Amino acid sequence: MNILYLHAHDMGRYNGLYGYAIQTPNLTAAAQSGTVFTNACCAAPTCSPSRGALLTGQYPHSNGLIGLTHRGFSLAEPSHHLAAWLRQQGFHTVLSGHQHEAADSYSLGYSEVLPPDHERVAATDMLSQDRAAAHAAASFLQSRQNQPEQPFFLAVGFRLPHRPYLPHQTVNPDRVQPPHCLPNNRQTREDYADYIESVQEMDRSAGMVLDALKKFGHWQNTMVILTTDHGIAFPHMKCNLYDTGIGVTLMLRIPGQEMPPLCDALVSHVDIYPTICDVLQLDRPAWLQGQSLMPLFCGTESIRSEIFAESTYHAAYEPMRCIRTMRHKLIVRYDDDFSKFVLPNIDNGLSKRFLLVSGIGDVVRSRVELYDLHLDPAERNNLADDPDYESVRKQLQERLDLFLRESNDPILAGYVPKPTGARVNQKSGIHPEDENYE
């Protein structure tokens, strides 16, 4: 069996698969014969740590990738990457487009890194890069039409819908509803309309790859994994441990497997690697920390009682950990020296600039947050100091602490240092692109 891994950038669950007024017909068509997970979460709401967790089956503090690769962070064991492991199992491993797990794609175990179409290689905008990645992937699938003997792992990484967004052309900003965690005003509507435009263009690129998968005879023997790294790049979303930050799109399609259209079970990105092992009927590597999703397709309602997520570095240092069950979430911040919003960890844009004028930089955040997700799914009412929830907070804290100890999380020792040479913004800065490094 082949594997196609489609990865969008900063998309959360904001697309047509999850009922939003965003046109993603290609993603929706692919999901018709697969399962969409409504409670899928990433292991980290930042780019490289999230991808590293998914593709090693290990949490960021376990695999070493606790910050951004282009800023000097790296995996401790690149051989744990899914591409490297599948190559050892006899797969032809191919990357087309964007990856964010290493500075050198070949170090991750890819047999081949596809060059984009020559005429598109000079283009620097993300739309052209995504189209080039889609064209290259489609050409690869065509070339494999008569080579069925060796299975392939094809990773196609799209840059969209990462900021800077495409300017809206087909989306009317007067007819969009911004995410619930943002005020509904001109700035956020314009910003969100640009996001929608970017998602819809990403869907067109994905459609080119999916169409080629069918056209060249691979659809019936290819597992499809469609996901993203974390929440969308708006305030209170990306780089946060709220569900707006850790909630992700996840669709799996496994040929020959009867699959429900929706699954409400709580699952994590670290569960994908062991699932692939089970689908291929291969022994799981010893380093994996997730659970296989396969029982969910055979009548089991849940495979885990909680998920864990973390953030240590993005543009700046912001150490947080959380435990989330179906009913509750506990978020703990471990930086005792800085209690306000770490503004460099919020991507620049119209929504952020509006909130800067409104005073978001002066807001003091709670060190501990507890939410009842049944009664407060928007995570607005912090119950950490509510005596009626004291036992819930204590139990979740004990479970979180146990996980951190068992997985040797360095946060338990206090400050987690950055690697030598890594570039990290000062926490008191404003935007990630500002060169105010520590």
Image (cartoon, rainbow, N blue to C red):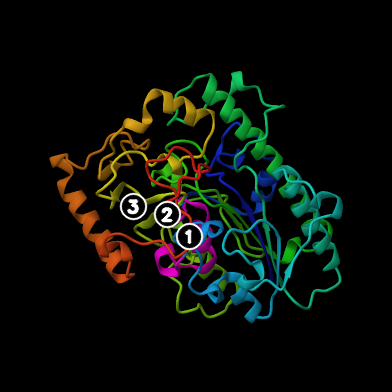
- Which sits earlier in the primary sequence, circle 3 or circle 1? 3
Q: What's the residue type where badge 1 is placed?
A: Ala
The CA span between labels 2 and 1 is 11 Å
Q: How far across and how far down the image is residue 20, in percent? A: 57, 34
Which residue is denoted by mark 2 in the rendering?
313
The CA span between labels 3 and 1 is 34 Å
Q: Nearer the viewer, residue 243 or 405?
A: 405
Which residue is denoted by mark 1 in the rendering?
422
Task: Tell me the magenta residue range.
Answer: 41-64
141 left or right of 406 in image = right
Q: From what the image shows, is residue 322 above or below residue 194?
A: below
The CA span between labels 2 and 3 is 24 Å
Residue found farthest to the left: 387
- Which sits earlier in the primary sequence, circle 2 or circle 3? 2
Q: How far across and how far down the image is residue 158, in percent? A: 67, 50
Q: Nearer the viewer, residue 4 or 102?
A: 102
Q: What's the residue type where badge 3 is placed?
A: Thr
The label nearer to you, 3 versus 1, is 1
Q: From what the image shows, is residue 194 above or below residue 172?
A: below
Q: How far across and how far down the image is residue 336, in percent? A: 24, 49
Q: Secondary structure beneath disc 2?
A: strand
Q: How far across and how far down the image is residue 226, in percent? A: 61, 54
391 left or right of 221 in image = left
Asked whether the residues under the numbered discs 2 and 1 touch, taking CB atoms below 8 Å apart as contact, a structural biologist would say: yes
Q: What's the residue type where badge 2 is placed?
A: Tyr
The label shown at residue 325 is 3
Q: Residue at x 40, y 46 (%)?
A: 426
Q: Nearer the viewer, residue 156 or 24?
A: 156
Mark 3: few/some/many CA within 10 Å (<14, 14-19, 20+) = some
Q: In terms of image quadrants, where is residue 359?
A: top left
